[in-house]
Image (cartoon, rainbow, N blue to C red):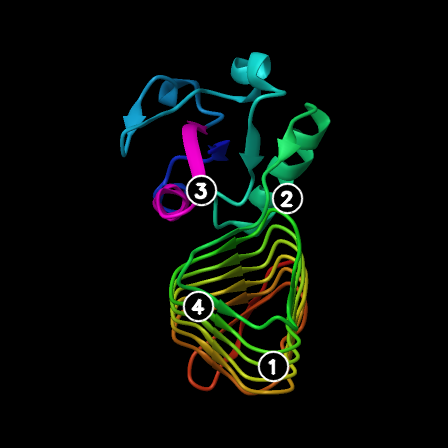
Amino acid sequence: MKKIVIWGCGGHAREVNHLCENSNYEVIGFLDERSEMKGLIIDDVPVLGDLHDIYSLRNMVKIVCAGVGDPSLKKRFVTKTKNAGFEIADTIVHPSVFISKRSTLGVGSIICEGTIITTNVQVGNFVIINRSSNISHDNIISDYVTIGPGVNIGGNVSIGEGAYIGIGSSIREKINIGAWSVIGGGAFVKNDVPAKTLYAGVPAQLKKDLD
């Protein structure tokens, strides 16, 4: 069994723990920067504290940095983990996921149950693809992207670094989603989305700039 520690102890971290229970991983603990969380038991897993609290385990465990949905927080945890000398966990894929042999996965990502990834899809590093998402052909999903449950993405879509695609949303084919943008839950995206913007609605429209 591969021993791992998961950043975060909220809902998504617990989902990752659930995924690991169905894979060849042993979760020995959660990480949380909040001192008051240290010592709690969540879903039968202890909160070990921050990285400095597990330094003695540095050469014994790997760290899951995609245990939180917020893309910017994921990126900060990656930097913090690497700087502390810990090894990043491999990409974890639920056994029920269908992924084409012509698609590629980066490091440190989480692919949840029921997801379908068809041909020639490029999934970057520290990406989260939640349950029952459908990812069509020739898509590019950049580093730190989070895709919510039940998202449908047409072919030839490019999603920029750190974008957040909300639950149940749909993206038409041949669309570009800008870096660090947010797509609201249930939205239908039929036009390109600029970087650092929030789009929501059916069809999706600009709600505000996030810069």
Q: Badge 2: how crowded within 10 Å, few (<14), some, or many (20+)?
A: some
Asked if the residue under mark 4 is in contact with the one under mark 2, i.e. CB atoms within 8 Å, the reply is no
Residue in view at x 59 percent, y 15 percent: 55
Residue in view at x 43 percent, y 20 percent: 48
Amino acid beneath label 4: Thr
In the rendering, at what x and y percent does residue 58 appear? 61, 20
Asked if the residue under mark 4 is in contact with the one under mark 1, i.e. CB atoms within 8 Å, the reply is no
Amino acid beneath label 3: Asn
User: Pointer 3: what residue?
Assistant: 24
Residue 84, placed above or below residue 77: above
Q: Earlier in the sequence, mark 4 or mark 3?
A: 3
Furthest toward the top, the residue is 56
Q: Which numbered tag is attached to residue 137?
A: 1
User: Pointer 2: what residue?
Assistant: 75
User: Pointer 4: what residue?
Assistant: 115
Q: CA distance from mark 1 to mark 2?
A: 26 Å
Q: Badge 3: how crowded within 10 Å, few (<14), some, or many (20+)?
A: few
Front residue of 112/24: it is 24
Residue in view at x 56 percent, y 42 percent: 73
Quarter of the image for residue 206 reads: bottom right
Asked if the residue under mark 2 is in contact with the one under mark 3, i.e. CB atoms within 8 Å, the reply is no
Q: Earlier in the sequence, mark 2 or mark 4?
A: 2
